Image (spheres, rainbow, N blue to C red):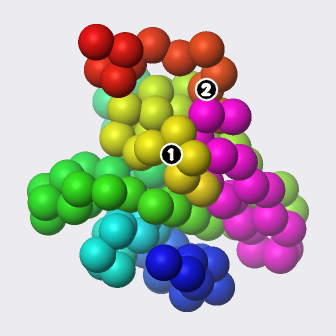
Amino acid sequence: MDIDLAGLRAQAEAAREAAWAPYSGFKVGAAILDGAGGVHVGCNVENASFGLTSCAERNALAAAVVSGAEILLALVIYSPGDVPWSPCGACRQCINELMPADAEVHSCCSAGAVRSWRVDELLPDTFSIHHR
């Protein structure tokens, strides 16, 4: 399946508008393409107890799980600023659990820069359910 990165970026950017980020002011959106062509979006939702904050990537993954998506092909993250940020450690673990090792992860920013990885590059030497 061809991956429309521009289209996924636009959906991630739109999801960003719904973010709840009153503490950092740093709104992030994410969009995931599944094997059936469906797109699942998420945004970050902050909490005064920062450990309870939920990142856009994990919220998009949860949306994909809720909708019954079985194969996740690509994840696009959109954030403001000049730097396309990589996913945090917790998101990397969740991405690793739910996406195949060769799935694509792309981070875009409002300045236009893009960084890209395969899932197995984000979390090398991983341990997961796939090791049973």
> Residue at position x 13%, y 60% from top?
68
Residue 37, quarter of the rendered image: bottom left
Which of the two discs, 2 and 1, labels the residue nearer the N terminus?
1
> Which residue lies under the disc numbered 1?
23
The residue lying toward the viewer, choosing from 114 and 26, is 114
Left of 49 or right of it: where is 56?
right
> Residue at position x 35%, y 41% from top?
98
> Which residue lies under the disc numbered 2?
123
Residue 80 highlighted magenta (yes or no): no
> Residue at position x 71%, y 48% from top?
117
Question: Is any atom of residue 128 visible in this view?
Answer: yes
116 vs 18: above or below: above
Which quadrant holds the C terminus?
top left
Residue 44, percent across and down?
43, 53
Q: Are marks 2 and 1 in contact (CB under 8 Å)?
A: no
Residue 125, percent across and down?
61, 14
The residue lying toward the viewer, choosing from 28 and 36, is 36
> Helix, strand, or loop for circle 1?
loop
Left of 6 or right of it: where is 69?
left
Residues in magenta, as a range:
105-121
The residue type indicated by label 2 comes to Leu
Label at residue 10? none
